[in-house]
Image (cartoon, rainbow, N blue to C red):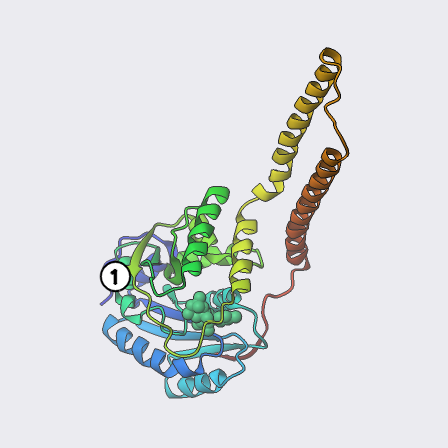
Amino acid sequence: MEPERVCADGQSLQRRISGAPATCDIVLPVYNEAANLDELYRQVTAVMAEAGLRYRLLFVDDGSTDATAAVLEELAMRDERVRFLSFTRNFGHQVALTAGLEHADADCVITMDGDLQHPPHLIPELLGRWKDGYSVVLTVREDNRSAPWLKRATSRGFYGVINRVSGLTLTPGSADFRLLDRAVVDALRQCGERTKFLRGLINWAGFRSTSVPYQPSQRFQGKSKYSVGKMAAFAWDGVTAFSALPLRLAFFVGLVISLCSFTYGLYAVAARIFWNASVIPGWASITISVLFLGGLQLIFIGLLGEYLARVFDEVKGRPIYFIKRKVL
Ligand code: UDP
Ligand code: MG
């Protein structure tokens, strides 16, 4: 029997009224994770057997070049609850997550990584919170001492900056391991942008949310697919998707520099009149100020370019991924 739900999110509530059992889609983006899939399947199905609701494992093979597709094919043959999409090439983790959400049609959707760093034993707790009426159940990494110091520091810095400039309230350490109610998934689908910064959009959408702390495990097999460059690009996507402050910075910096130079100009005139002295002893000050302003202008033109490139990307309106094989 389906447990009592307090939440009044359209679709899920309709399901409850119609008496059908609740369903759950678990979306797993995987990129070259062949060595992890069997163990992942074993752990997740073991946990879900206890949960007592209908579920599917929806893998998104993000253009893997190892045996991932073959293992998925085999799992899908063996168990009809295993479904998957294979991309034509590697489109990136966030795109794979987006594709998974677009193909999920259950009452709730759980997204988790395919390397077992997101512990499957937490799933019942996520489902429990959902049944308590939360539409979004986030997981938050407890300070992970095994992660490199630099990764923890940059992550903390990123959340500090984005929360300040974007008006979002993102929880530091929140992971892509989360449960979303059907209503939230539908809301995300309505967000038309190509580059979806999911954690920002989920927070921005404003559904009732809670979080569960967890201790991240070590990667089961293989190594991280997130290079420093990919992390930086991800962070920058987040800032530009949710804040126009960098664009406005040029105005404020320009204002401050104008005020300073105006004050300096007044001082130069006064010095000439009252002390009959020239305050410009040579060309060094001129060269430095010209170079400084030139550099500043280039920086801000570059920033304009960043936003323009994003507008260009959106305007082209290309599909964000292509699927070469679909087993749904
Ligand atoms: N991933 C993906 N596409 C990519 C990079 C990663 O689908 O281009 C998947 C990867 O297979 C894993 C998850 O995203 O299931 C998280 O990636 P990873 O474990 O490499 O990142 P980390 O945990 O080190 O941040
Ligand atoms: Mg990982």
The reply, left or right, for residue 55 in relation to residue 265 is left
Residue assigned mark 1: 128
Residue that appears at 75% across and 12% down: 273
x and y percentages locating residue 219 in the rendered image: 38, 73
Q: Quadrant of the N terminus?
A: bottom left
- What is the residue that sits farthest to the right in this orientation? 283
Q: Judge whether residue 42 can be spotted in this image.
A: yes
For the residue carrying disc 1, how many other residues have a C-alpha within 10 Å: few (<14), some (14-19), or many (20+)?
some
x and y percentages locating residue 103 in the rendered image: 47, 69
x and y percentages locating residue 326 in the rendered image: 51, 79
x and y percentages locating residue 303 in the rendered image: 65, 48
Which residue is at the front of the view, 245 or 275? Answer: 275
Which residue is at the front of the view, 62 or 132? Answer: 62
Q: Judge whether residue 104 can be spotted in this image.
A: no
Q: SS at mark 1?
A: helix
How many numbered circles are shown?
1
Residue that appears at 53% across and 50% down: 239
Residue that appears at 50% across and 69% down: 96
Tag 1: residue type?
Gly
Q: Quadrant of residue 137?
A: bottom left
Residue 150 versus residue 321 in the image, above or below: above
Mark 1 Cβ inside 8 Å of ligand 1: no
Residue that appears at 37% across and 79% down: 81
Residue 269 versus residue 297 in the image, above or below: above
Q: Quadrant of residue 14?
A: bottom left
- What is the residue that sits farthest to the top in this orientation? 274
